[in-house]
């Protein structure tokens, strides 16, 4: 009898999967159960999804295309509910988006949800957003339109309202063993000696006392988010079944939330332990067996040397994609200091990594910006970590330097003096201030900075992801302060409701919305058409000789595009020779023979002898002839 596709895939991974599973759990019957369940989930997978799996298996680089553009959105903020999102697919296509990240939508208790990251039922949609059947309909429509759908798989913890948590709280040993329960504070106190805090102000400590249960429970995030104990194979198996259930709803990309935290050991920091990598590797194999069309996106908000291992190795890959978090934070450092050197260095690190590694690039996400910068380098340049963080936070609140930014601190830690930052891209670029002060010149500069930051992000190696609302320059939303469920969490400042009235203005090219939308549209179309934007392209930075100006060049199959970005409020002129660009200069003889450049924004052949950039401006030049 011919082997089924499932058997072939299982056979391919079985030995390694069993080996890793037994190393972690040493439990043959639980492993056998896992394998049986994999088959069941494969059998349940729809014909359409299986067809897509096969196509993607044959073309594993399907997502490494230059037309990939993501957008992250909260379903209710964006369109009310899942059916509403379905009705907005035309708008998303108009935004050139072909990948949407639906922010957490699974059932979660109101007011104790951490923006949906406290899941009380992995198989139920929050009732006000719709049902699993709505989700299936949406993913199926997206598939027809060529839009991939990403969701969060929050596997580090459950809500205290999850069935397991309720039964654990009631004293059922089987369920207590799925979390970390302690009847006194001796062990929690030991953990606290080495485990840093995630939310030092809004949720201090890593344990929560449950007076009714007479126990402490481990809660690395909020007290209502109970850490799961992956030392228990039942937890691993059940969570994998949840993962596959959701994959079968037609999800293309699983964002593994807070993945570095999923394994805990006493006397460690409980982050990035080697067992975490064993689990992620097993997840990768499990999805390659059941649903090879699904991609794993790891949420690793850490310094570069901790992030990269989550790609695994070429032979034993873990995540398909990771967030380019240090580059994102360094970008804002560059905005505040006008000095591109650290950013150049950071981009050089990313560009030197193997091309199989795909990063998601972004200017903003739903979380705060943590100032995770390369302080070693900054220190050598005379910048001290604490003082510099203070400067960045002051700058983006608009109180230091020549700043036009507006925004708020997040989790300011009175002990360490540390704080992170919240604000929308537009508000951080000065659009909010300029609008409030009705200052046209400042508005022009702020819009230019906003667009330049996007143009620079699009030049980076990897896949760009927009935050919904950024395409029309949405501002901070201060209304969260009136909602008692949100008031203590300033991340809601940049998680506002999509303003569809403002979005109407995109047709008016003179409006702020129209200017941003149309310029991003042009950049997105350039990205789609020019093959140098493929993720496999060679990307490198060029020293411009000007500390305010960054230059990135991308080369692919003989083509070359150079992006030059002015991070200062002064107009700049850079000699093309400096950037390795030969231009056709009418004043010099015979230069035509050396070839020239096409300015992709104006569409004109470049005749100038210098690259001229206005304050906060940029250019994209393509080598031609
Ligand atoms: C991730 C999410 C964040 C959430 C945390 C806990 O970091 O991005 O919003 O608070 O996980 O689940």
Image (tube, helix red, strand yellow):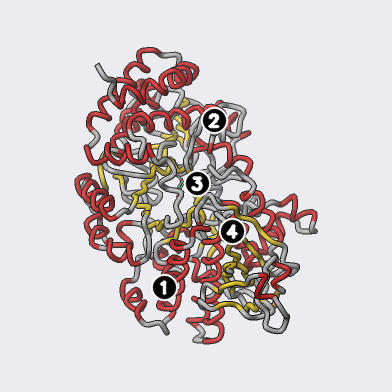
Q: Secondary structure at mark 4?
A: strand
In the displayed structure, 418 sits above or below 167; it is below
What whole-number distance in Å separates the C-alpha atoms at marks 1 and 4?
A: 24 Å
Q: Which residue is mark 1?
A: 517
Q: Nearer the viewer, residue 577 or 353?
A: 577
Q: Sequence-wise, which precedes: disc 2 or disc 3? A: 2
What whole-number distance in Å separates the C-alpha atoms at marks 2 and 3?
A: 15 Å
Q: Sequence-wise, which precedes: disc 2 or disc 1? A: 2
Q: Nearer the viewer, mark 3 or mark 1?
A: 1
588 left or right, relative to 143: right
**Horizontal and vertical percent for residue 251?**
32, 44
Q: Residues within 10 Å of mark 4 (few under 14, many from 20)?
A: many
Q: Which residue is mark 4?
A: 554
In the displayed structure, 490 sits above or below 107; it is below
Quadrant where the image shows the N terminus: top left
Residue drawn 48% across and 38% down? Answer: 319
In the displayed structure, 4 sits above or below 562; it is above
Task: Give the quarter of the image for residue 172.
Answer: top left
Q: Secondary structure at mark 3?
A: loop
Residue drawn 57% across and 42% down? Answer: 307
Q: Nearer the viewer, mark 4 or mark 3?
A: 4
Q: Which residue is mark 2?
A: 188
Contact (Cβ within 8 Å) of mark 3 with mark 1: no
What whole-number distance in Å separates the C-alpha atoms at marks 3 and 1?
A: 38 Å
Quadrant where the image shows the C terminus: bottom right
Which label is found at residue 203? 3
**Horizontal and vertical percent for residue 327?**
60, 55
């Amino acid at each position: 009898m011919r082997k089924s596709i499932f058997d072939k895939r299982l056979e391919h991974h079985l030995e390694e999967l069993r080996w890793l599973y037994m190393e972690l759990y040493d439990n043959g019957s639980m492993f056998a159960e896992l394998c049986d369940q994999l088959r069941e989930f494969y059998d349940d997978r729809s014909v359409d999804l299986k067809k897509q799996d096969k196509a993607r298996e044959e073309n594993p680089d399907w997502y490494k295309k230059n037309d990939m553009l993501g957008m992250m959105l909260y379903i209710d903020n964006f369109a009310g509910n899942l059916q509403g999102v379905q009705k907005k697919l035309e708008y998303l296509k108009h935004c050139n988006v072909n990948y949407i990240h639906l922010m957490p939508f699974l059932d979660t208790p109101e007011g104790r949800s951490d923006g949906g990251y406290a899941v009380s039922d992995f198989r139920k949609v929050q009732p006000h957003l719709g049902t699993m059947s709505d989700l299936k309909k949406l993913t199926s429509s997206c598939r027809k339109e060529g839009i991939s759908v990403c969701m969060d798989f929050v596997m580090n913890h459950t809500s205290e309202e999850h069935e397991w948590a309720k039964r654990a709280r009631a004293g059922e040993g089987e369920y207590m063993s799925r979390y970390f329960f302690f009847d006194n504070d001796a062990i929690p106190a030991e953990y606290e000696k080495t485990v840093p805090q995630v939310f030092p102000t809004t949720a201090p400590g890593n344990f929560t006392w449950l007076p009714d249960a007479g126990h402490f429970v481990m809660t690395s995030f909020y007290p209502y988010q109970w850490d799961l104990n992956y030392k228990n194979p039942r937890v691993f198996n059940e969570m994998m079944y949840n993962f596959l259930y959701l994959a079968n709803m037609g999800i293309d990309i699983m964002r593994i939330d807070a993945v570095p935290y999923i394994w805990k050991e006493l006397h460690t920091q409980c982050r990035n332990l080697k067992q975490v990598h064993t689990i992620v590797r097993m997840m990768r194999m499990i999805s390659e067996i059941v649903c090879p069309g699904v991609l794993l996106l790891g949420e690793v908000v850490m310094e570069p040397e901790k992030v990269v291992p989550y790609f695994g190795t070429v032979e034993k890959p873990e995540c398909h994609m990771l967030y380019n978090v240090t580059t994102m934070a360094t970008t804002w450092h560059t905005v505040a200091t006008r000095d591109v050197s650290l950013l150049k260095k950071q981009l050089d690190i990313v560009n030197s990594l193997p091309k199989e590694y795909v990063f998601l690039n972004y200017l903003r996400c739903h979380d705060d910006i943590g100032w995770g910068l390369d302080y070693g380098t900054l220190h050598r340049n005379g910048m001290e970590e604490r003082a510099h963080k203070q400067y960045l936070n002051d700058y983006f609140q608009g109180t230091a330097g020549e700043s036009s930014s507006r925004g708020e601190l997040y989790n300011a830690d009175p002990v360490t003096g540390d704080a992170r930052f919240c604000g929308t891209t537009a508000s951080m670029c000065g659009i909010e201030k300029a609008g409030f002060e009705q200052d046209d010149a400042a508005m022009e500069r702020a819009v230019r900075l906003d667009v330049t930051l996007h143009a620079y992000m699009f030049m980076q190696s990897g896949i760009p992801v927009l935050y919904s609302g950024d395409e029309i320059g949405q501002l901070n939303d201060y209304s969260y302060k009136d909602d008692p469920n949100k008031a203590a969490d300033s991340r809601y400042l940049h998680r506002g409701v999509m303003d569809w009235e403002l979005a109407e203005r995109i047709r008016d090219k003179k409006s702020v919305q129209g200017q941003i939308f149309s310029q991003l549209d042009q950049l997105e179309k350039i990205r789609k058409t020019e093959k140098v934007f493929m993720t496999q392209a060679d990307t490198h930075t060029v020293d411009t000789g000007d500390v305010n100006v960054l230059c990135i060049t991308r080369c692919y199959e003989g083509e070359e595009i150079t992006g030059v970005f002015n991070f200062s409020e002064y107009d700049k002129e850079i000699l093309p020779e400096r950037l390795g660009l030969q231009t056709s200069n009418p004043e010099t003889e015979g230069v035509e023979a050396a070839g020239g450049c096409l300015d992709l924004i104006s569409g004109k052949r470049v005749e100038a002898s210098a690259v001229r950039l206005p304050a906060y401006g940029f250019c994209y030049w393509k080598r031609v002839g």
